[in-house]
Amino acid sequence: MFDSLSPSAQSDLLRGLVERSRPQPGHARPVVVFDLDGTIFDNRPRTCAILRAFGEKCVLERPDLTEKLRGLRPHHVPYLLTEAMAAIGITDDSDVAALHQHWVSCFFVDSWLHHDVALPGATQFAKACWQNGASLVYLTGRDLPNMALGSFASLRDTGFPIGVPGTSLVCKPDPATPDEHYKRDVCPEMGRVGEVIASFDNEPGNCNAFLEHFPRAASVLLATQHMPGAPALTPGVVTINDFSI
Ligand SMILES: [Mg+2]
């Protein structure tokens, strides 16, 4: 667990970044970098929809499983799927394995991304930064072959600035690359867009990498979910719960 800023300190931080989004004479254009999953989007509703669909498919042969899955809600879903299953009473190894296999086949493709919902305040904050003049980069570990188009649609349909000047969606070219390696390698490239003033991510390792590459920018952790065994935060990374101002 990480200590989040108080609501008023969170508000001050976000308001300050909206203000800093105004281009200044003699400076490169400000850039704000957003991760997607667990940062501006809550993807737990996607997991719930995928698993409930599995339950509906096996309603005739396994009504018990269907009934349990119908009760699955986002608050049951921590980072690991096994924990979510245990929370609704599904512990049989073969059931968990079948559900996991189904989840993997759906979670990482375009067609399920529309279930994601924006974190509180995220759309408004991104819009305010963009309207003040910052360029926005959505930098995600979602992969280009299977998830880019759905991600674009999801950003558009939830009201984030996308498909307009000063916005870009950057995806992982190879699905097999581990997210943390990809982010660490690609984050210096964000400097080619302009002057990075802030980055937001839900993985402590990514926040540390950003602070290392852009020490004058705000590196902000979203206290949502993160990989088990994540590193400690480098001093200087700040933590917020959402984007409420
Ligand atoms: Mg993430």
Image (spheres, rainbow, N blue to C red):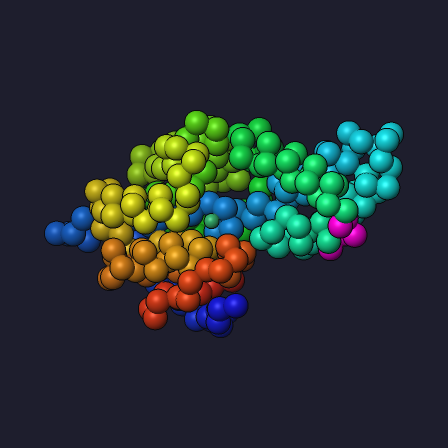
Choose top left, top right, bottom left or bottom right for residue 78: bottom right
Q: Main secondary structure of the magenta part?
A: loop
Residue 70, image x, y percentages = 79, 42
Q: Is residue 236 left or right of residue 151?
A: left
The residue depicted at 46 percent of the width and 45 percent of the height is: 36
Check if residue 89 falls in the magenta segment.
yes
Q: Answer whether residue 197 is visible to the viewer in this image.
A: yes
For the view shown, which residue lies furthest in the left direction? 26
Check if residue 77 falls in the magenta segment.
no
The residue depicted at 81 percent of the width and 45 percent of the height is: 68
Q: Is residue 134 left or right of residue 94?
A: left
Count of marks overlaid on the render: 0
In depth, the one of 125 and 143 nearer the eye is 143
Q: Answer whether residue 143 is visible to the viewer in this image.
A: no
Residue 74, image x, y percentages = 67, 50
Choose top left, top right, bottom left or bottom right for residue 174: top left
| Residue 180 versus residue 215 in the image, above or below | above
| Residue 29 versus residue 162 in the image, above or below | below
The residue depicted at 86 percent of the width and 41 percent of the height is: 64
Residue 40, image x, y percentages = 48, 49
In depth, the one of 188 and 196 nearer the eye is 188
| Residue 109 versus residue 135 in the image, above or below | above
The residue depicted at 75 percent of the width and 41 percent of the height is: 95
Choose top left, top right, bottom left or bottom right for residue 186: top left
Residue 109, image x, y percentages = 54, 31
Q: Is residue 148 left or right of residue 234?
A: right
Report the magenta residues as a range: 87-91
